[in-house]
Image (cartoon, rainbow, N blue to C red):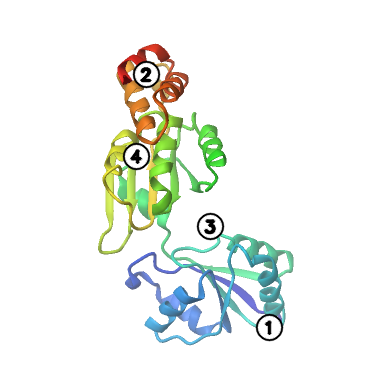
Amino acid sequence: MNGKLYIVGTPIGNLSDFSPRGLQTLESVDFIAAEDTRVTAKLLNHFGIKKPLISYYEHNRIERGEIIVEKILGGESCAAVTDAGMPCISDPGMELVRLCRERGITVESVPGPTAFATALAVSGMENGRFTFEGFLSVNKQSRREHLDELKNESRTMIFYEAPHKLKATLKDMLNAFGDREIAVVKELTKIHETVMRTTLCGACEYFENENPRGEYVLILEGIKKDKKEQPVTPEQAVKIAKELVKSGMSVNEAAKTAASETGIKKSLIYKELV
């Protein structure tokens, strides 16, 4: 008889958020597939749970996926967990779920905290309709192409971002979208949980003198229908160009880029910059 794969959501910060069912599942399965076995080992130790761990992450998912599936087909039950939050969303766990479904293995969810939904709830941003975009590419060109595809997105957009990439991402967003409202949310459910409501320009300026720490969720305003008909002011165009200069772009290139994005004459922007 086949075993079963359980998708178990774990706390995103506060360990008190772990559900009784989640704990019961980890205690009952035969083994646990973890994104980082060291992180999961700490979680298990905290709750006094002893279970065999097998690592399953982006770079070993093909080989380990087959091993996990064979063990389940052999009658063992497995719990899949990520470092924090609900697994199999914006992580390689979705490949494991697909593989199990293809092999006829039952997959059962054990819901837990989810960072993007929690961040959206506390941000105060429009949340009737939204799109989850996950992590942007580390590759600069791919990241900018992704953002370019979202220029006319009217729904609120949600992104995950690591601290070492945050500054570059905010500047690329400003370049792609112009100045829009944003909520920068970090360290959800932890002692230093912070929700900063500002604009893209304001966020870029803030992090010029602030070193990003912790994991971030970015909640970005979608384009407003009336804004499609309202031209950007010269002042706004100059502000965008100044941020581009701060990011390392030459004055000439910044003026050219800002002109392309806003429709304001390059010569006017250049004049204000110099």
Single out the mark in the foreground, 4 or 1: 4
Give the residue displayed 30% in from the left and 44% down from the top: 207
* Marks 1 and 2, how far apart at CA: 62 Å
Q: Are marks 1 and 2 in contact (CB under 8 Å)?
A: no
The residue singled out by tag 4 in the image is 182
The answer to whether residue 127 of the structure is visible from this angle is no
Drawn side of residue 250 relative to residue 63, left or right: left
Q: Which mark is residue 89?
A: 3
* Marks 4 and 2, how far apart at CA: 18 Å
Residue 195 at what x, y percent from top left? 28, 49
Identify the amino acid type marked 4: Ile
How many numbered dots are placed on residues in this image? 4
The residue singled out by tag 1 in the image is 75
Of the numbered discs 1 and 3, the one sitting upstream in the chain is 1
Q: Residues within 10 Å of mark 4 (few under 14, many from 20)?
A: many
Give the residue displayed 40% in from the left and 47% down from the top: 166
Identify the amino acid type marked 2: Val
Single out the mark in the foreground, 1 or 2: 2
Q: Residues within 10 Å of mark 2 (few under 14, many from 20)?
A: some
